[in-house]
Amino acid sequence: MGFPVERPRRLRRSESLRRLVRETRLSVDDFVYPMFVVPGDGVAEEIGSMPGQHRYSLDRLLDAARRVEDAGVPAVLLFGIPETKDPLGTEAYAPHGIVQRAVESLKERTKLLVITDVCLCEYTSHGHCGVFEEGRVVNDATLELLARSAVSHARAGADVVAPSDMMDGRVGAIRRALDESGFGETAILSYAAKYASAFYGPFREAAESTPQSGDRQGYQMDPANAEEALREMALDVEEGADMLMVKPALAYLDVIRRAKEAFHFPMAAYNVSGEYSMIAAAARNGWIDGRRATLEVLTAIKRAGADIIITYAALDAAGWLRGR
Ligand code: PBG
């Protein structure tokens, strides 16, 4: 057939037609909202590198979490910034650590699904994601500490634990530790394909987790590799991951698509801090329409194959979707 019989523009003539033939529908049900909890009282400080995002002390976290709930967003992903840091990141697995208390509080007082980030980098004085010796992160010694962290989160009431460290074997180590401690129902969302990305820059200011020396290329993935991402995911599936994640999202849409096709698992994508802040900064300067750009990228992430979108824009997007 072809032109002039075929005219694809016929189906773009009106919003009602476009609605009818739209292939990808963003929903508030897809969103997970990341939140940062810090020590202190009455703290709600805006993060300079992430306009519109805040770090909250426990009391203020609860108010903010209620707003998340009211917006209809089903889940939060919690990051803790401890009072003190040490080489072994002991506050990461302290029974009454900052994140453990935050989980308890949210599970007691809200209906939100609570996911915790399991990693050591916010808790270690050197800022690396594991035990750091002679300039290297030691894989197997780190597993034990990650497993302890995950169990402490589960004990506090976390529904899902999300390891983001990229050590080999951590999903298996965490699954075994959870099962042995009676947390067989706690799910694992694995940051399976996490790249060594420049787009984490703003987050590292928020979480005070910039490595004091070196970088994370010895454990996070090379942005050039996609086959390797599929191997990472296969390993995590074997080790007992319940859900898989690709992170960041926008520069890795091809990886999301391939992973969705290769594994029949719920697929999450993390629309990371740098991706958020680029739009936020440009919008503040009047260079871009923040609302349209945000909805466009979130739709693209879903179209690529993500079932779950972790995004700092969750609250804004929830509001816009409701108003539409
Ligand atoms: C590590 C962790 C990071 C992010 C989530 N978990 C930072 C890193 O690996 O350096 C980044 C999130 C973002 O940029 O929004 N605990």
Image: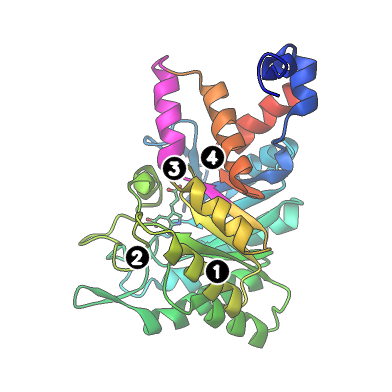
Image coordinates of residue 58 in percent, x first then y, are 57, 51
The residue that disc 2 covers is 85
Whether the magenta-drawn stretch holds residue 69 is answered as no
Q: CA distance from mark 2 to mark 3?
A: 23 Å
Question: Does the residue at mark 4 contact the one at mark 1 (Cβ under 8 Å)?
Answer: no
Q: Amino acid at mark 2?
A: Lys
Whether the residue carrying mark 4 lies under 8 Å from ligand 1 is answered with: yes
Q: Residue at x 72, y 47 (%)?
A: 74
Question: Helix or strand or loop: what does disc 3 sit on?
Answer: helix
Q: Which mark is residue 273?
A: 3
Residue density around tag 2, few if under 14, some if 14–19, many if 20 or more, within 10 Å: some
- Which of the two marks, 4 or 1, is nearer to us in this view? 4
Q: Residue at x 67, y 22 (%)?
A: 2
- Which of the two marks, 1 or 2, is nearer to us in this view? 2
The residue that disc 1 covers is 96
Q: Is residue 135 visible?
A: yes
Image coordinates of residue 136 in percent, x first then y, are 24, 74
Query: If the image is split into quadrants, where does the C terminus sit?
Result: top right
Q: Is residue 46 visible?
A: no
Residue density around tag 1, few if under 14, some if 14–19, many if 20 or more, within 10 Å: some
Query: If the image is split into quadrants, where does the N terminus sit?
Result: top right
- Which of the two marks, 2 or 4, is nearer to us in this view? 4
